[in-house]
Image (cartoon, rainbow, N blue to C red):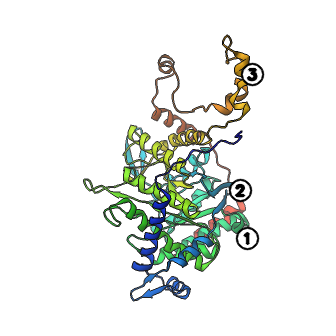
């Protein structure tokens, strides 16, 4: 008998397909090479046995790539601000969070957007802190009211103050990333505690095709030094900065991510690393880069499968739409992406609440997707099969003349079997009309209003907040 449910999963690639994509990625690295602008990284690669040509082109042998894959950890435990376990990245475990650095925030009642300010970072952190299925936070905004060189650092400070959940951060360079590390060290009461219980993850990326800027690599090296979990995820655009074909798109993305892995592991063997790619698709009719085109989804799902092939934690996507407002298109696209990511076993899934090709954020969409994630997680618990679940004795007792409504077996398993929505409507038409006849968006707006009015995140201790503020005030680039 099976006492543990088999988790559903999704696959688009055969083992032979994965082998071919892997070999193509290795050939890109060893025959075509990557262009780097960082002398230390080039020296690390050369000393390891790579060929470094004029102009900073590094060609990386496949056996060295395999060593880096073998050295990187297969799972990465992440803890919240209070040092409690929050996520275990790896395997087919899926976690969800907001995205970062949006230019606009949407007022869904007026269908108007405004340029993001620091307060938008604060609001998004508070909302995410209140929602049980949002596992980590990102800034959700790039504050236009803050000097660019300070915007990332102040966003990090505000996120830490308004949520206990783990942070995935972006940074301008090593200097402000170092200050974020100092803030996390203060919150952990020391570097050793921060290393053993990581609180934040850094996101960096190369530039497709095949280029690795100085700041991206410099931040990668800093993360390796300090054992900060790091994402190194390219965003190759099919038809623009990557091949139009899905297999070529994925192979290039894998190669670009693996160049970062090589440098990272040469700097610090065993340091925590997340692979991934954002496989945007250039719409040749509009010039927009779609987050939700079928070709995007296929390339993204292939990248997830490749991460399982390598047994490395991956960076993923969920809850996003190309629609400009939280309408029917947004609900469909965001829900579909969330479902696919979970069923494929993507680990760290960001961008919940994104609209308009990643330009605009909607707090109501975060609220709606929190419920979507909850329902998909119910599906992923699967179907346990054992004597208790088959209920033959219960069926025998009830027979053809009784009912299951009043049977103790129904009461026993009611709450563990049936998923209950908080936003979705399950009333009949007359009951729905009598209760106000509201739409999903209207109910999400009301829940958002309640969260912002009632939810108070756990504050940081005053002495830590003062130390953090002093560092932020003194920061100069």
Q: Which mark is residue 82?
A: 2
Image quadrant of residue 359?
Answer: bottom left
- Name the residue that disc number 3 marks: 408
- Tell me if I can see residue 435 in this picture: yes
Name the residue: 49% across, 37% down.
445
106 sits left or right of 175 in the view = left
Distance between mark 3 and mark 1 Cα atoms: 52 Å
Q: Position of residue 264 (x, y in %)?
A: 57, 75
Image quadrant of residue 167?
Answer: bottom right
- Name the residue that disc number 1 marks: 192
Q: Position of residue 362 (x, y in %)?
A: 45, 46
Distance between mark 3 and mark 2 Cα atoms: 41 Å
| Residue at disc 1, secondary structure | helix
The residue positioned farthest toward the top in the image shown: 401
Q: Is residue 265 positioned above or below 291 on the image?
A: below
Circle 1: is it few (<14), some (14-19), or many (20+) Cα within 10 Å? few
Q: Position of residue 181 (x, y in %)?
A: 62, 69
Number of the front mark, 3 or 2: 3
Number of the front mark, 3 or 1: 3
408 sits left or right of 348 in the view = right
Q: Is residue 32 positioned above or below 357 on the image?
A: below
């Amino acid at each position: 008998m099976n006492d543990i449910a088999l988790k559903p999963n999704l696959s688009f690639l055969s083992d032979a397909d994965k082998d071919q994509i892997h070999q193509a990625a290795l050939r890109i690295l060893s025959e075509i090479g990557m262009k780097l602008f960082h002398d230390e990284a080039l020296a690390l690669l050369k000393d390891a046995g790579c060929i470094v040509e004029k102009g900073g082109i590094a060609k990386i042998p496949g056996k060295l790539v395999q060593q880096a894959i073998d050295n990187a950890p297969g799972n990465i435990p992440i803890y919240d601000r209070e040092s409690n376990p929050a996520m275990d990245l790896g395997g087919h475990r899926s976690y969800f969070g907001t995205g970062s650095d949006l230019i606009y925030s949407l007022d869904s009642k007026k269908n108007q957007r405004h340029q993001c300010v620091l307060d938008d970072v604060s609001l998004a952190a508070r909302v995410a802190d209140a929602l049980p299925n949002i596992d980590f936070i990102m800034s959700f905004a790039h504050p236009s009211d803050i000097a660019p060189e300070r915007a990332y650092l102040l966003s990090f400070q505000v996120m830490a103050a308004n949520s206990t959940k783990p942070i995935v951060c972006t940074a301008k360079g090593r200097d402000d990333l170092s200050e974020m590390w100092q803030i996390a060290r203060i919150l952990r009461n020391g570097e050793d505690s921060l290393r053993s219980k990581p609180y934040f993850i850094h996101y960096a990326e190369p530039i497709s095709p095949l280029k690795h800027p100085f700041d991206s690599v410099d931040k990668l090296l800093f993360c390796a030094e300090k054992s900060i979990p790091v994402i190194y995820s390219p965003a190759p655009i099919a038809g623009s900065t990557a091949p139009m074909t899905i297999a070529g798109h994925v192979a290039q993305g894998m190669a670009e991510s693996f160049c970062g892995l090589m440098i990272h592991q040469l700097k610090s063997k065993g340091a925590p690393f997340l692979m991934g790619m954002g496989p945007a698709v250039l719409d040749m009719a509009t010039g927009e880069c779609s987050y939700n085109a079928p070709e995007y989804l296929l390339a993204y799902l292939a990248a997830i499968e490749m991460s399982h092939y390598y047994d490395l934690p991956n960076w993923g996507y969920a809850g996003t739409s190309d629609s400009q407002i939280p309408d029917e298109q947004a609900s469909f696209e965001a829900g579909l992406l969330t479902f696919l990511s979970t069923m494929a076993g993507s680990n760290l899934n960001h961008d919940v609440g994104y609209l308009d090709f990643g330009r605009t954020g909607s707090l109501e969409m975060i609220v709606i997707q929190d419920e979507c994630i909850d329902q998909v997680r119910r599906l992923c618990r699967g179907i346990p099969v054992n004597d208790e679940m088959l209920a033959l004795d219960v069926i025998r007792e009830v027979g053809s003349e009784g009912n299951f409504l009043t049977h103790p077996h129904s009461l026993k398993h009611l709450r563990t079997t049936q998923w209950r929505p908080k936003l979705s409507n399950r009333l009949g038409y007359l009951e729905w009309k009598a209760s106000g006849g509201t739409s999903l968006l209207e109910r999400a707006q009301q829940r958002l209003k309640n969260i912002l009015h009632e939810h108070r995140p756990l504050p940081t201790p005053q002495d830590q907040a003062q130390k953090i503020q002093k560092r932020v005030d003194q920061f100069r680039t």
